[in-house]
Image (cartoon, helix red, strand yellow):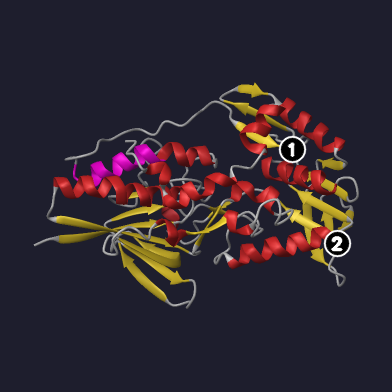
Amino acid sequence: MSKSQNIVILGGSFSGLGIAHNLLRHTIPALTSADPSTSYKVLLITPSTHFLWMIGAPRALVSEELVPIDKTLLPIKDGFKDYPAEAFEFIQGEAIGLNTTSRKVDVKLTTSGSEQSVDYHALIIATGGHTSSALWSQHGSHEKTVQALKETRDALRLAQSIIVLGGGAAGTETAGELGSAFGSNKDITLISGSTRLLPKNKASLGQDAETYLKNMGVKVKHGVRVAESEKTSTGKTTLTLTDRTTITTDVYIEATGVSPNTNWLPKELLDPKGYVKTDPDYLRVIGAGDRVYAIGTVGSYSKGSVFDSNDAIAPLMTNIEYDLSNGKTGKEKKVVLNQKETIVVPVGRDKGVGILFGWRVPSLMVWAVKGRTFFVEKAPEEVMGTKYTKRSY
């Protein structure tokens, strides 16, 4: 008698979608060919019905004309409509608990708020991370990001003063986009908590980025953080900084770090920083039992970049195939991440700073590689899975 096994994927961003398409197109056909007595069903569970192209957020928040909302938020179901119903199920919900003994995930459905338990034979945790603002990550339903984009765009049009918090890539890119759009007629300030911009990278990158920003009329304030923010009765925001000064601004945009979406997991599965304890070679979750994996920002192996997700998909797929077939198909393959410094940061519409695989690249190349479009045209590839048409593992 045929038996069916659930492969549950938690998360609908880069990693989750990539894993789902690879399973349905390549891994499951290989498994059922090797053992026709077992069938598999992929269950993709994520709080939003839409995929967010967060790479384009710095430009998208400026105006609809530059980056339309429907180019950065794409319906996930469109990418899976051609798969058989018995092979794939989409569940709009948020993981709220995990029992590794009974092998069940507890899920709270986004629309109704009701809860259900989902059995898994294999589990892939790709829940990613969250930011304080819905501009950069989804806070449940995609409508919250749509609302945040519209409200920010409307506020920017009327604003005389704008403050961006965060001296990393997101903050620097955002300040550059605002400088290009409004630098000549609005007061724009970028607050950096470090001594320079892009503090995790070579000093020259941050120095050049700051020069580009200042040339656009953007002020840069280093060495302070926001201790407290408060909305005033007039809709402005008053910031209390760590140097005990206060600033009031028309628009306040937080573009700071990402925290892992792991508060639903048992504490014993997390490292001290809240990331899933993941074997860096094979991406199996340490202490979670058989056939449980983590990929992307949520995993302790990752430095948080999209590269760490993309580079891990192919080796993880063959490891999953190996585990599900008990070694009959697939093979164990170690994840090898790029260890050479790689970052590309557009600063405004026609300039940028970058390092590719340890080599500094000119501003024009940064514009050509990323600054021209922020890769928005590639978003459909993630949803539709066209980049996974051929097996790569």
Evaluate if marks 1 and 2 touch, with contact meaning CB atoms under 8 Å apart: no
Q: Is residue 301 visible?
A: no
The residue under the point 91% across, 49% down is 185
301 lies left or right of 231: left
Q: Main secondary structure of the magenta part?
A: helix
The residue under the point 56% across, 45% down is 377
Q: Which mark is residue 241?
A: none
Q: Residue furthest top?
A: 359
Check residue 350 for magenta coloring.
Answer: no
Dot 1, how many residues are within 10 Å of its Cα: few (below 14), some (14-19), or many (20+)?
Answer: many
Looking at the rendered structure, the kind of residue marked 1 is Val
The residue under the point 84% across, 41% down is 220
The residue that mark 2 highlights is 158
166 to 201, vertically: above or below: below
Dot 2, how many residues are within 10 Å of its Cα: few (below 14), some (14-19), or many (20+)?
Answer: few
Viewer-proximal residue among 344 and 202: 344
Counting residues from the N terminus, which is met first, the one under dot 1 or under dot 2?
A: 2
Where residue 356 appears, as percent x and y from the top left, is 59, 26
Check residue 316 for magenta coloring.
Answer: yes
162 lies left or right of 295: right
**What residue range appears in magenta?**
313-326
Numbered disc 2: secondary structure: helix
Looking at the rendered structure, the kind of residue marked 2 is Leu
The residue under the point 80% across, 65% down is 230
Where residue 261 appears, as percent x and y from the top left, is 52, 56
Where residue 191 appears, as percent x and y from the top left, is 80, 46
Give the Cα distance between marks 1 and 2. Answer: 23 Å
What is the quadrant of residue 368 in the picture? top right
Looking at the rendering, in which quadrant would you find the C terminus? Answer: top left
What is the quadrant of residue 372 in the picture? top right
Numbered disc 1: secondary structure: loop
The residue that mark 1 highlights is 347
